[in-house]
Image (spheres, helix red, strand yellow):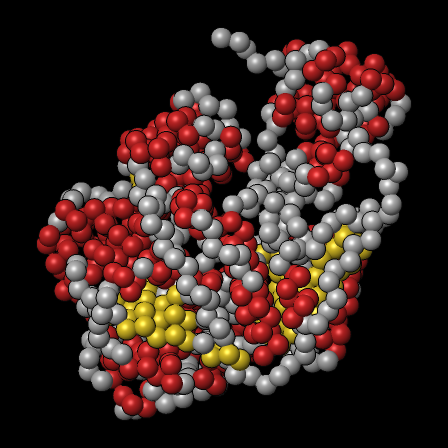
Amino acid sequence: MQSAEAVLHGLDDEQRAAASTLTGPLCILAGAGTGKTRAITHRIAYGVRAGVYDPHRVLAVTFTARAAAEMRSRLTGLGAPGVQARTFHAAALRQLQYFWPISVGGQMPQLLDHKVRLIAEAAKRLRLTTDRASLRDFASEVEWAKVSTITPEDYAAAAAGRDQPAGLDHASFARLYAAYEELKDDQHVIDFEDVLLLTAGMLTEDERVAAQVRQQYRHFVVDEFQDVSPLQQRLLDLWLGGREEICVVGDAAQTIYSFTGASPRYLLEFRRRYQQAEVVKLVRDYRSTPQVVKLANTLLAERSAEQPRLQRRTDWKRSTGEQAEDPPEWPDPLQLISQRDAGPDPSITQHPDDDAEAAWIASEIARLSEEGTPLSEVAVLYRTNGQSQTFEQALATAGISYQLRGSERFFSRREVREALAALRTTSMVDSDETVPQAVRAVLSSLGWAEKAPTSAGAVRERWESLAALVSLADDLSAEREGFTMRHLLAELEERSAAQHAPTVEGVTLASLHSAKGLEWDAVFLAGLCEGLMPISFAQTQAEVDEERRLLYVGITRARKHLSLSSSAARHAGGRGRRKPSRFLEPLRAELGLEPTVRKIAPGSGRPSPNAASRKKTAVCATCGTVLTAATQVRRQRCEDCPPRYDPELFEALREWRRQAAQEAGRPAFMIFADAELEIIAEHRPEASDEALLKLPGIGPKKLEAHGDGLKSVLQEHAPEVA
């Protein structure tokens, strides 16, 4: 084994200062791309080799299973394989399962995979009308309340000023929340938030358990500390038990999950709480070129001036859900300093419409690919998932393969499951062949070949999945001495459990939120117009600032090539009234570009009767996605969200339409489109001319032709009145 000092070789001065500070509270403020994971893993390994840490008494906590798996892999490579690196939930669940028989007794409740079923049952008991979309909103609100340590009794007061979940007033939701908790108790099940709550309760109430946990873990490291929730902080305090052997790593400029209950307060106030804490700032950016870093610094430097004290108090509560007489001050953002050679200037472009923007991005990706940039090193990032369809179509038309981040998980794919089964049963586990040779021999029978298929579609997708496994075997074999097939199988099992997928050859399409923690050689930030960036429902200064930080996260994902783009209209031939994002103007000035000039055709001088309606961006009533397609606008629902209409009434309307179309000898869609029937089934209007005329898609002529039939169906399916 190498000496302890050897672990510090290759670290810069700031990383070395962080890695060599082994005791006492330590706060590492790490900007994007500054090597925070490298710093904390080398710190742990250095402490282990120096004899300061017992590896089995160190707990490193992060927020995703992927990040935890990456940390464990690095620690193993650094000679510290016994360190526990887990998510908050995984660490808490392990303790809860171990101590439950000792502290509580009996069988531990079963862990509930999804809340929706029980929430639906609770709503039914309260006679609340729900659909899949509202149930999803209710589940998210329950999660927010629980991670914010808000009980059903306290919810109504704590949620004052917060948006009503699915339009349900706070008092009614508090009753729903209470009914959900009662159902869990009746059925002897717990949800994921209960894992943290019960573990915290056990440590609080049972001194024997608390003493044993604190004896087991002496040193703590918490990554992404700006994303800690009040409940996670409470559990962390109980683990510490008043001790100060804690190292936290975070960056306030990357706080983008406030809507889930995460709070940057604990990072911002760390020095206030631990007055003797050492603070190390990592500002050397090893990821991005000077051009990309300069743009990121410019974006944060333009953050709006501090709001008055009262407004800050209101904004802090609205964005975090916390009461705060003295909300913490946001520090000046870290000024990153690029350590890479100069690269190309970022580009900022505006296009006539969404399709033109997507086609231009596809052509730029093709150019980069021809110049040698692998498709796996290219990403298109956007604000909402509903924007992906346009880019999927453009890339497919251009013959460019892509993968949707957040769609089917890599280890859930059929070909990957078949490959893992074949690798487990192969007789080559104990052979003398190298791991890469053995993997190629096994996977060649499943469709892998040295040369990629020229066709697109399922054949190419299957090959890319298998090729990712081959590439992973090559990389691990090169990195680890004495690497065997048994080691590979163990690595694949761990990655499968953590959903830590290898790289797949293809452009990544992802939302900005899901891109956190990732990086690519080339990044296209698309759809940067008002209403999307910042999103239309960002109303307060705190919410707009979080949108700015979200764009900052997107910019800092790029290593070399960066493109920011917007479109003036949704569809070809549109009037082009969209405004580029307000965040782009200072970036244009930094790049020496002229300010955006919007050319609007001169009007008649008379106000348009539709002007008021055009001022409001159409968004999905469920998730807030900006809607572009006309049918989506009519439905007030994007393609990703489930319908909100009464399915029984909808099917009855479809059957009536089919018969009416047959009698008239016309296609069914000429009677009523599906979108129009969905709106009728959702609103369930009274069977009257006045009520029907209020719905979009029904005018006097259509009412005269088909009103009697519609009224008949509505009367037949009218809800019973108590």
Residue at x 14%, y 46% (from the top left corner):
205
Question: Is the residue 246 above or below the residue 231 in the image?
Answer: below
Residue found at x 83% / y 49%: 600
Work out whether 528 lies above or below 423.
Answer: above
Q: In which quarter of the image is residue 275?
A: bottom left
The residue drawn where x is 27% and y is 79% is 21
Answer left or right for 603 relative to 102.
right
Q: Is residue 411 left or right of residue 614?
A: left
Residue at 81 percent across and 27 percent down: it is 668
- Work out whether residue 5 can be spotted: yes
Q: In which quarter of the image is residue 566?
A: bottom right
- Would residue 500 be seen by someone viewing this image from the given angle? no
Apparent side of residue 337 relative to residue 182 in the rendered image (left or right)? right
In the figure, is residue 295 to the left or right of 180? right
Q: Residue furthest front?
A: 308
Q: In this view, does 718 lie above or below 101?
A: above
Q: Quadrant of residue 650?
A: top right
